[in-house]
Image (cartoon, helix red, strand yellow):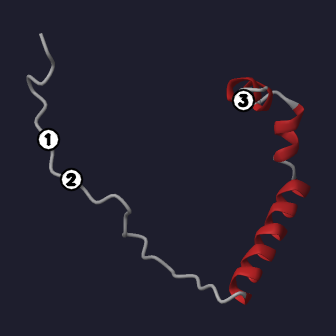
Amino acid sequence: MKDGYEDQGKNSRSKDSEEFAEERSITSRERARSQLSTDVEEFLAGGGAINEVDPEVTADPPRKPQPKYGSRPI
């Protein structure tokens, strides 16, 4: 039985590895773009819709600062 840590070590990549360099190649990027384009076309054909969001809209609105002075135990 394999655990998540063992699999994670095998799948981790460093910038020096050949696999990482292949992912950044022009052909791999073209494949990713064509796959994304196909997925978007299927989504729209299936009745999906794409909504454009204004650039100033954020997902995390600003919060009131919380005082933390003296909150640590002695």
Residue contact between numbered discs 3 and 2, judged by CB atoms under 8 Å: no
Circle 3 is placed at which residue position? 8
Residue contact between numbered discs 1 and 2, judged by CB atoms under 8 Å: yes
Q: Residues within 10 Å of mark 1 (few under 14, many from 20)?
A: few
Q: Secondary structure at mark 3?
A: helix
Residue drawn 76% across and 74% down? 39
CA–CA distance in space, label 3 to label 1: 37 Å
CA–CA distance in space, label 3 to label 2: 36 Å
Which residue is most to the front?
1
Q: Which mark is residue 26?
A: none
Residue drawn 87% across and 54% down? 28
Circle 2 is placed at which residue position? 63
Circle 1 is placed at which residue position? 66
x, y percentage for residue 52? 51, 80
Q: Amino acid at mark 3?
A: Gln
x, y percentage for residue 40? 72, 77
Q: Residues within 10 Å of mark 3 (few under 14, many from 20)?
A: few
In this orientation, which residue lies closer to the viewer: 27 or 37?
Answer: 37
Q: Amino acid at mark 1?
A: Gln
Q: Amino acid at mark 2?
A: Arg
Residue drawn 82% across and 57% down? 29
Quadrant in which the N terminus appears:
top right
Q: Earlier in the sequence, mark 3 or mark 1?
A: 3
Relative to 69, is 29 above or below?
Answer: below
Q: Quadrant of residue 15?
A: top right
Q: Earlier in the sequence, mark 3 or mark 2?
A: 3
Residue drawn 87% across and 49% down? 25
